[in-house]
Image: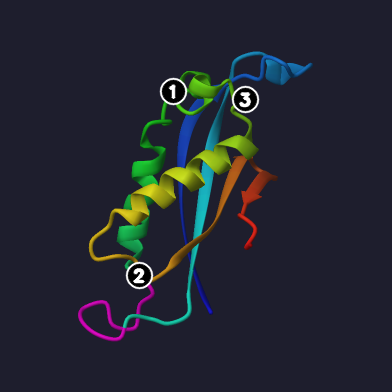
């Protein structure tokens, strides 16, 4: 099994209104996001022979997913504002996983790899990884 990973960073503010402490106030982070896909085989023909996927394609997917959040207040972004979800690192990871999965599913040709996980780093030494359980 292969695992391929790309990462990208964005800057955004947020606050956690129900939290008791400093995070209750508006503050910002340089969020770093890592995305992993898995595949059993590499591509066996064409210009991408021997690859799981072109890194540039995967980076483009990630950039598209986080573009709406870059230099924004996450409390004002979907899905957080629409569903009264606190924009914690955990909820950001799930939201990005969902966005990346939707973007990936629309690609032609389809990816041969499957979305495995999204890790969101709130700052140095602090991260959360979302990996849906296999049923």
Q: Are marks 2 and 1 in contact (CB under 8 Å)?
A: no
Relative to 20, 83 lies left or right:
left
Mark 3–mark 1 distance (CA, rounded to whole Å): 15 Å
Relative to 93, 55 lies left or right:
left
- At mark 2, the secondary structure is loop
Does the segment drawn in magenta span residue 51? yes
Which residue does the numbered mark 2 point to in the structure image? Answer: 53
Q: Is residue 89 above or below residue 81?
A: below
- Corner quadrant of residue 84: top right
Which residue does the numbered mark 3 point to in the structure image? Answer: 86
Q: Nearer the viewer, residue 87 or 30?
A: 87
Q: At 59% from the left edge and 25% from the top edge, which residue is drawn?
A: 85
Image location of residue 23, percent across then percent down? 69, 20
Mark 2–mark 1 distance (CA, rounded to whole Å): 30 Å
Instruction: Please name which of the two marks, 3 or 1, marks the residue nearer to the observer.
Output: 3
Q: Are marks 3 and 1 in contact (CB under 8 Å)?
A: no
Relative to 24, 73 lies left or right:
left
Image location of residue 30, percent across then percent down? 53, 34
Q: At 62% from the left edge and 50% from the top edge, which residue is drawn?
A: 130
Which residue does the numbered mark 1 point to in the structure image? Answer: 72
- At mark 1, the secondary structure is strand
- At mark 3, the secondary structure is loop
2 or 3: tag closer to the N-terminus: 2
Q: Which residues are magenta?
A: 44-53
Q: Are marks 2 and 3 in contact (CB under 8 Å)?
A: no
Image location of residue 97, percent across then percent down? 50, 47
Relative to 18, 78 lies left or right:
left
2 or 1: tag closer to the N-terminus: 2
Does the segment drawn in magenta span residue 10? no
Q: Residues within 10 Å of mark 3 (few under 14, many from 20)?
A: many
């Amino acid at each position: 099994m292969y695992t391929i990973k790309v990462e990208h960073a964005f800057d955004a503010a947020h606050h956690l209104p129900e939290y008791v402490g400093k995070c209750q106030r508006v503050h910002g982070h340089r969020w770093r996001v890592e995305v992993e896909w898995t595949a059993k085989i590499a591509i066996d023909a064409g210009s991408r022979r021997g690859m799981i996927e072109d890194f540039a394609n995967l980076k483009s997917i990630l950039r598209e997913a986080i573009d709406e959040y870059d230099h924004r207040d996450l409390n004002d972004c979907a899905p957080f504002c629409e569903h009264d979800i606190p924009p914690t690192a955990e909820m950001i990871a799930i939201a990005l996983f969902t966005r990346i999965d939707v973007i990936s599913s629309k690609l032609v040709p389809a990816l041969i790899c499957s979305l495995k996980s999204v890790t969101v780093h709130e700052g140095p030494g602090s991260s959360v990884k979302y990996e849906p359980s296999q049923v």
